[in-house]
Image (tube, rainbow, N blue to C red):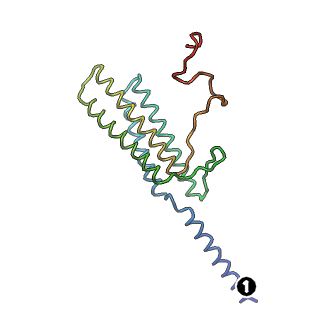
Amino acid sequence: MAKAATIVFVGLVFVLGICVSVLLLAHAAPSTEALDADLVQVRAQIKAADEEDLKYQGGIIKALVSVRREILRRSEAMLAQKRASFLRRIDLRYIVDGKAMAPASEERLTEIASDIDKANAALSKDLAGAARYSGGVIQAMSLMAVATDHLTVAQLSLAYFGAKYGMALPIPAQDGAPGTSAQPAPGVIVKDKDAF
């Protein structure tokens, strides 16, 4: 009888071992190492935005830097949430319009990465242009272009991480949906009394 119980126990341990192995392999990608690397990158960008924010007392450039920092913080929160779900073995899924979000294809990720590279090239060009001036309206305009480029890169990075990890991004409400205004779309001709 003891021999039969031992065989059953060993069989159960073997089956449980196989089940745990299958679960670990089923959730192998993306890895926590990739998430950690992305988190380090985003946190460095947040630190840079914080340092840049200290340079300005107010104005449009400070506002753009603040928006960029908030987008980066949203990226950080999204990645940290995904990482925590991996470590706790929670299957984090987002449902949008009745469909589960899934990580994007390599082709789509490459497309977004290409957009990020283009935005970084524009940023480098505008940084070089801003460095040519030491003050005045032209430098202010150049710095505003740089802040806008930084914002573009942050937005594209958020889109990239959302696509890479299958995370849902907030989608603006459509006309007629709750929380939207009845304002016409830009470029739509309106009556004079509705113009303002």
Residue situated in front as seen by the camera: 185 or 102: 185
Residue found at the far top of this picture:
193
Residue situated in front as seen by the camera: 55 or 167: 167
Name which residue lies at 44% across and 27% down: 63
Q: Secondary structure at mark 1?
A: helix
Image quadrant holding the C terminus, namely top right
Residue situated in front as seen by the camera: 97 or 28: 97
The quarter of the picture where residue 89 lies is bottom right
Number of numbered discs on residues: 1
Locate residue 139 relative to residue 92 in the image: left or right: left
Residue found at the far front of this picture:
189
Whole-percent x, y for residue 93 in the image: 61, 51
The quarter of the picture where residue 131 lies is top left
Locate residue 145 relative to residue 180 in the image: left or right: left
Question: Relative to 139, does residue 121 appear above or below in the rendering?
Answer: below
Name which residue lies at 33% across and 36% down: 122
Image quadrant holding the N terminus, namely bottom right
Question: Relative to 112, does residue 91 appear above or below in the rendering?
Answer: below
Question: Relative to 189, does residue 39 appear above or below in the rendering?
Answer: below
Name which residue lies at 51% across and 22% down: 187
Whole-percent x, y for residue 10 in the image: 66, 82
Q: Which residue is mark 1?
A: 5
Q: Amino acid at mark 1?
A: Ala
Locate residue 157 relative to residue 146 in the image: left or right: right
Whole-percent x, y for residue 86 in the image: 56, 57
Whole-percent x, y for residue 185 in the image: 55, 24
- Which class describes the residues within 10 Å of circle 1: few (<14), some (14-19), or many (20+)? few
